[in-house]
Amino acid sequence: MGVPPDLPSMRQLRYFVTLADNGQYRRAAERLGISQPSLSLQIAALENRVGQRLVERRRGGLVLTPAGREILPRARDILAQAEDLAALARSLDAGVTGTLRLGATPTIGPYMLPGILRHLHETHPELKLLARDGPPRDMIEDLLAGAHDLVVTQLPLAAADLSLRPLYREPLFLAVARDHALAARARVGTADLAGLDMLSLGPAHALHGQITRLCRDTGARLRSEYEGTSLDALRQMVAMNMGATLLPALYLRSEMPAHDTDVVAVPFHPVMTRTVGVAWRRSLGHPRLIARFLEAADAVVADAYKGLVVQMRGA
């Protein structure tokens, strides 16, 4: 698409500024690496575009007309803004600046994102990060609608329009009241769940599906009349002996101190896990901002979460 005839080109503005700075066509042409006739043609074209004489030739060089004096600082501003735009584009391409809009499910985001966001702030301070949490279904709908660039959620996801990248497998623990018969066990197996009352979050959460399948496979009873609104709510319900539930390792480290007197988290044998990863729209390809987030996530998982989760870098 061509430049409209009434708008000056960036080249013409740059030639005009260079000419004004050097005061002579010969010196300006040498600085620009073009011939004097070419420079004269471009200045004449600029004057035609703006409908004003900008320079007057004199024996000792040239002077700016009143219109030229008015237009010169604006031309400088336009060129500076254009350079800022080019620099921003280079930074965006390198993934070191810009705004990344993150969505996260509430059973994951509060317990794994702070370390990653802190790492990104330290390594790429020009990056702006906007984070919001919500149920997985809402997060994915918002992602597909363009409200988020990236969503941290439990995998797998059945969405043909999304690119998926697992980050880690996280152990799940059986949470029971302190006086429950299973509380003194060093570990439990799925056979120990037969007849056990289980509590869960609502159906919008991926953990609900996992607990539902566990109940179906082991003979545990899902107490569907009670649904927690958060992992904290589930833990409080467990403390009141309303049933048992599954709690993830990062939540336990963050929110449940070892001296908790009401709830005990018992590991499974073999280990029961969930997979946590990220999703973004396939149409985005693999932009640098998302690559920077994945690099930070891999670094934090390898360091801060070591021993708690099993990393799936590059999976």
Image (cartoon, grey):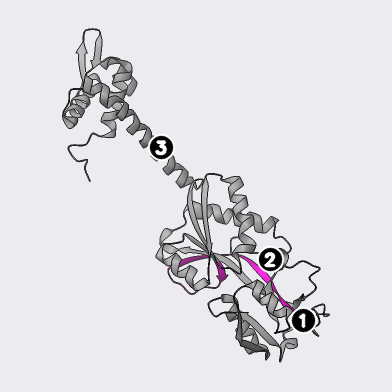
User: Is disc 2 placed on a helix, strand or loop?
Assistant: helix
Give me the disc on residue 174.
Answer: none
Pick whichever of labels 2 and 1 is earlier in the sequence: 1
Q: Residues within 10 Å of mark 3 (few under 14, many from 20)?
A: few
The residue that mark 3 highlights is 84
Give the amino acid at mark 2.
Leu
Image quadrant occupied by the C terminus: bottom right
Give the amino acid at mark 3.
Asp
Q: Residues within 10 Å of mark 1 (few under 14, many from 20)?
A: some
Q: Residue at x 70, y 84 (%)?
A: 242
Q: Is residue 195 above or below residue 64?
A: below
Give me the disc on residue 188.
Answer: 1
Q: Residue at x 52, y 48 (%)?
A: 127
Task: Please state the horizontal and vertical placement of residue 286, each as a whole percent of the image.
Answer: 47, 57
Labels 2, 1: front one: 2
User: Does the magenta stretch mainly form a helix, a strand or a loop?
Assistant: strand
Q: Is residue 214 magenta?
A: no
